Image: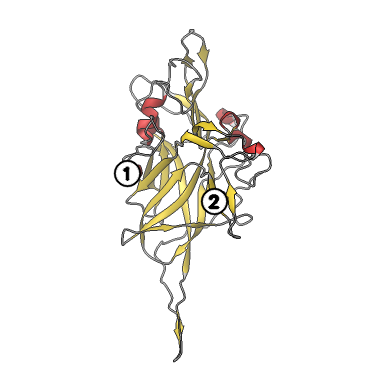
Amino acid sequence: MRALVSATIIPSLFLAACGGSSDSNSTAVVTTTQAVSIQFAAQANGADITCASNIAAISAGNPAMTLKDLRYYVSDVRLINNKGEEVAVKLDQNPVNPNQYLNVAMLDFENGLNSCAGGSAETNTTITGKVPSGTYTGLMFTVGVPVSAVDADGKTVSLNHSDYATAPAPLDSQALAWSWQSGRKFLKLEVNPVGGVTKPDTTVAPTFNVHLGSTGCTGNPAGGEAVTCTKPNRMSVRLTSFNIATQKAALDLNGLLGNSNLTKDEGGPVGCMSGADAECTPIFTAMQIDQANGQPINLGTSQTVFKAVAK
């Protein structure tokens, strides 16, 4: 379904801009662009993790664990230039990068092997695109799929609330389809803590789930109805100091799950499914999403889930 992206990493973010040409009657200004390749990672306890990793306890009272699944959508990727301005990254499209469509990209850290058995073989840890030539010092993005976007022909295209079976890649992922909410899982993180997760009836589930997506949704897109959601639950991320040449953006399990009890669930689906259950409270706090209305807090400046780390 998707191909592994093997993008060439740009050795330096800072490329020189070229000028234009002029004659006595007119002046033409040519805006040059530079290619960018933004690397992402998954980490715990300060080290990269994979489906082959044994992850030590991330906080007191929590056991060791393994990764079962980690995939998520990002959108509206922007770089912050040396003037403090937000500059949109024009994402490469299929076939250059089949993991990207319009302004949405999918990051995939599971490979269907070891503790991630049952997943898919393809992975993707890089976003590629272009920006105007310049000096950039920060990174911004949204974890989530927008309701819609405008394509190259100026047509508004439905994104989140669309049929995955007929959607273009990477929106065609069945693993990230959230049919009961008529949308998609923006983030799918599943971990298997040693000893499992004890439920209120004392039975034990093997997996603690974090599924982020819009909730309180009404409307049937299959019938042509507009879909509205009372809680969008899209996470804003702003890394004010980020060097694309030397750093990558890491999803940090300590920052996301460090205040959660991975061994116990208070009821309902095991873990956090973006509802009002107790398991979502520390996770939404880490994401800086208001659990009451699904809106981001402080534009992502105080979230603890993503951080800049050395390549």
Q: Is residue 9 visible?
A: no
* Position of 36 relative to 32 (above/below): above
Q: Looking at the picture, which amino acid does disc 2 mark?
A: Ala
Neighbor class of circle 1 (other Cα within 10 Å; few <14, some 14-19, many 20+) is some
Which numbered disc, 1 or 2, marks the residue that appears first in the sequence? 2
Q: Nearer the viewer, residue 301 or 97?
A: 301
Q: Quadrant of residue 162?
A: top right
Q: CA distance from mark 1 to mark 2?
A: 25 Å
User: Residue 88, percent across and down?
Assistant: 44, 57
User: Residue 77, percent across and down?
Assistant: 45, 51
Q: Nearer the viewer, residue 286 or 195?
A: 286
Q: Residue at x 66, y 37 (%)?
A: 223
Q: Residue furthest right?
A: 166
Q: Looking at the picture, which amino acid does disc 1 mark?
A: Thr
Q: Residue at x 46, y 52 (%)?
A: 38
User: Residue 308, percent across and down?
Assistant: 37, 46
Q: Residue at x 45, y 77 (%)?
A: 29
Q: Which residue is mark 1?
A: 301
Which circle marks residue 149 in the picture?
2
The quadrant in which the N terminus is found is top right
Q: Nearer the viewer, residue 185 or 292?
A: 292
User: Residue 219, percent across and down?
Assistant: 58, 34
The answer to whether 282 appears left or right of 194 in the picture is left
Callout 2: helix, strand or loop? strand
Callout 1: helix, strand or loop? loop
Neighbor class of circle 2 (other Cα within 10 Å; few <14, some 14-19, many 20+) is some
| Tag count | 2
Q: Residue furthest bottom?
A: 24
